Image (cartoon, coloured by chain):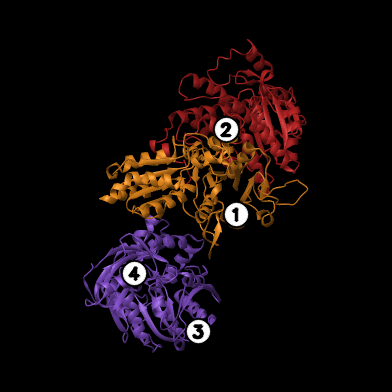
Chain colours: A red, B purple, C orange
Amino acid sequence: MSKNPFPLSKDELLKAYRTMRTIREFEERLHVEFAKGDIPGFVHLYAGEEACATGIMMHLTDTDRIASTHRGHGHCIAKGVDVHEMMAEIYGKATGACRGKGGSMHIADLSKGMMGANGILGAGAPLACGAALASKFRGDKGVSVTFFGDGASNQGMVLESMNLAAVWNLPVIFVVENNGYAESTSVDYATAVDSYVDRASGFGLPGVTVDGADFFAVYEAAGEVIRRAREGGGPSLLECKMARFFGHFEGDAQTYKAKDENELNRANRDCIKMFADRVREAGVVTAAELGAIEKEVEALIDDAVAAAKNALPPTPRELTTDVYVSY
Amino acid sequence: MADESVKPIVMPKWGLSMSEGKLTGWLKTAGDKIAVGEQIVEVETDKIAGVVEASDAGVLRRTIGEVDAVYPVKALIGVIADASVPDSEIDAYVASYVTPAADEEEEEEKSAYAFVDTPVGSIRYAKRGERGDAVVLVHGFGGDLDNWLFNIDALAAKTTVYALDLPGHGQSTKAIPENGLLGLAKGLLGFMDALDVERAHLVGHSMGGAVSMLAALEAPQRVQSLTLIDSAGLGSEINADYLAGFVSASSRRELKPVVEQLFADPKLVSRQLLEDLLRYKRLDGVEAALSTISSQFQADGKQRTVLGPELKGFDGPILVIWGEDDRVIPAAHANALAGAKTEIISGVGHMAQMEKASRVNELVLAHLGV
Amino acid sequence: MARKISMKQAINEALDLEMKRDPTVIVMGEDIVGGAGAPGEEDAWGGVLGVTKGLHAKYPGRLLDTPLSESAYIGAAIGAATCGMRPVAELMFLDFSGVCFDQILNQAAKFKYMFGGKAKTPVVIRAMVGAGFRAAAQHSQMLTPVFTHIPGLKVVCPSNAYDAKGLLIQAIRDDDPVIFCEHKNLYGHETDVPAEAYAIPFGEASVVREGKDVTIVSYGLTVQRALEAAEKLAKDRIQAEVIDLRTLSPIDWDTVVESVESTGRLVVVDEANPRCSIATDVAARVAQEAFNALKAAPQMVTAPHAPVPFSPVLEDLYIPTADAIAKAASKIASHAIAA
């Protein structure tokens, strides 16, 4: 086996691959299951963007916190939330991560530093500032990461949060997941600047744009901004440009996209394929090793779906529990 | 002089902070013959409801106070006079009656409470009267010096009265001394030291009775006499539900039925009495202090300190007073001390000194020999 | 030991005692220290009306002046609360909730439920409410019903200094998000307040005056007006019972219903606008729970369905007056006296 040219050990590479494959399998499977009509509500799939969540989260521990978005399954999996609990939550079952009361858009696991997917675009930014402030007071060296899309980047609370993080020098990273669409609206239409780095500099924040389909580019850029924040160097912005393989939500006919856009993206902008090719071609990881992970992940998702389908829904008394800690 | 045959019934001053009271009902009607000590009119203060008893005999000639009206302390609410006194004289008396100004009272109120540093911490107390023997009033579990509001002035007419808040109570330190009731007894003696009270008559209510007895055993030379009212320490039975309820209650709704057990007449528990108790109970440290004292005081529903049948080592006179309907500590304990004078008052609960203040004051003054 | 202090001092004292007791308590808001980064004196303001004055020197670094950026700092307070802090965020005027409502409505209020019970958000949002300050339509509203409507939030509105201190201490110790509404015209109001720390439990109304003829229910400034009204009514021999709700969520229905069961008459006084208000809430609940005890139709005395006006002449007509309360009570209770 050749010398490892990557900044990650072989075990870490396999871990990254397992994470990305788990996200992909989770989302592809949801796409299928949703069409069967068993899943209530909306789901927003992260397929195509796996390298972004994974490349960032490889630098974080449970002490670090993330505030996620409506398209949050990938962030959850990469932050270590239990896949069975996530799937059960999406099916609205009592065994779900939120006991069936949150659903796809609100999966959270605070013990893993996952402050919640969020149905309100941009709302995670102030919350991540608060988490970073708490870390600062505690002196635990924790870093907070808030994810938001190119659409939510125009929310006032995101912009206010960049200013607050800058003036308070908070250890928080603003990650713009630029997949080109705010729901159906193109980023070119809705965002006045060409680069989010320019916008960051307006708040005195260092910013960097990377190819979000390139796991290693994300990993390296995230490593630098997170290290800086951890060492007291303050907030940064990281823009990851990538492709959303599915629609805004499941059931979206995606007529606003170019005709062959999804096919071209899957062929040329698939972060997982790109990652697998590189690590295999470098001779660090074998096809068999990757294949084993794929099988393992497939079995995991099969099991999670079966378990979620068989799980019981919440009991009626759950309707009014957990509104308050005490009332 | 006409005034000597005409006796006013005035709005009483019960306690240190009372400035006015509401007349809630007449128990007698004009023309009734009245004997000394008879209950004439019901009055409610912001602290407690009570009954004005006749201090003079005669005929109730006028009921001036109107039901539900509020009158300042010492306002004329009725007139007693002999049947022979002509109406014109009564009318003249009423017309010329002037309610004494409240200025003096307010001045008094400012100095009503004081604080003194003692070895167990800061202790709040009230001192009334300047003559005769020293008397120290020791309240019970969860109480404070206001438990004596119907007694302190009556006793102060002939003695120098001190009423204190025990540690953990009222506005005194919330730190509880070691050694349970004995610690409180030592705290009481320390309080007397701090005020240079060499020797005193101790009047203790409930747990304060047990504390007074322990002080008397600890320093018999400093205790001139004991008066024990509905006292702890004379038998093992105690209403543990009351104690537990008092410690745990955090709302008016929870506290009311608990506190009602203290009185034969639950109507005496006023809104303000409960509010004052809640204000005390809400202070940081009070719940912990009360649970500590409660556990030192009783275990498994039995009092842990039972003194008697005789207080060996204390030779002074002892008076035991009990409310017949006491639902916290049974009145049967009244007979536990050989050699003590005993008085059981009917129609009265655990708070005998409040529910039948005039009788208790009379008994205590007689016991003190003043 | 109790002494007379103002509601403003009582709030300052509550913050002081809790910051001393618990290092996770931090305070943030616009100008709560004042003069941050400016060349003049430190702690220049201590809040726009001086409520937090003096705390900066005692707890350096734990009072954070914020940019004028309510979404960001209210959201940050909420985020920090989910991460083990107990932030007290001052929103200056509750009217400003318009620019950070999402963080209150969709974040703080929802976490506990939406995350299946796993989150707790012990944040306090302090804000001034109420009219009478000549501050017009955007700095004077009584928005309590807006927040009471939202499950997951607790809503507190004290009427006096004693309650303000005990309720704020409870709010800080409470594990749920609390909207703490301070009527700006009560800041100078003085009552006896113990120097020690004490917590008043939520959901326990205070019966501030007992009476048998009519129940007057209110909260905040109008409790004082209701007490004045009760004095007036007493002169007409109508004995009014005055109930101060103290907390609007949770609300003490038992005390209200029990009182109306004994008086048979209800006047509910609310400085908020009349529609979907605390007044309608209390009247409806009483109608449902104590219908058979009612001897007359419940009366609501509220602000009009209009924004708060600027002109003093108009504003003085806005907040329910003692006269209006007494009139409403007389209307339903006067025949009780004749009987």
Residue C311, above or below C204 = above
Place of residue B189 in the rendered image (x, y in percent of width and height, measured from the top left): 49, 81
What distance separates the C-alpha of mark 4 from that of mark 1? Answer: 52 Å
**Which numbered mark, 4 or 3, is in the foreground of this view?**
4
What crowding class fits label 2: few (fewer than 14 Cα within 10 Å), some (14-19), or many (20 or more)? Answer: many
Q: Chain of mark 1?
A: C
Place of residue A84 in the rendered image (x, y in percent of width and height, measured from the top left): 52, 33
Q: Chain of mark 3?
A: B
Q: Quick one: SS at disc 4?
A: helix
What distance separates the C-alpha of mark 3 from that of mark 2? Answer: 71 Å
**Which numbered mark, 2 or 4, is in the foreground of this view?**
4
Pointer 1 residue = C12
Pointer 2 residue = A117
* Disc sitting over residue B95 in the figure: 4
Looking at the rendered image, the quarter that the N terminus of chain A falls into is top right
Looking at the picture, do discs 4 and 1 lie on one chain? no
Badges 4 and 3: C-beta atoms under 8 Å apart? no
Residue plotted at (53% across, 37% down): C308
Q: Quick one: SS at disc 2?
A: loop
* Disc sitting over residue B197 in the figure: 3
What crowding class fits label 1: few (fewer than 14 Cα within 10 Å), some (14-19), or many (20 or more)? Answer: many
Q: Quadrant of residue C77?
A: top right
What crowding class fits label 4: few (fewer than 14 Cα within 10 Å), some (14-19), or many (20 or more)? Answer: few
* Drawn side of residue C299 relative to residue C56, left or right: left
**Which numbered mark, 2 or 1, is in the foreground of this view?**
1
Badges 3 and 2: C-beta atoms under 8 Å apart? no
Q: Amino acid at mark 2?
A: Ala
Q: Amino acid at mark 1?
A: Asn
What distance separates the C-alpha of mark 2 from that of mark 1? Answer: 37 Å
Badges 1 and 3: C-beta atoms under 8 Å apart? no
**Which numbered mark, 3 or 2, is in the foreground of this view?**
3
Place of residue C334 in the rendered image (x, y in percent of width and height, measured from the top left): 31, 48
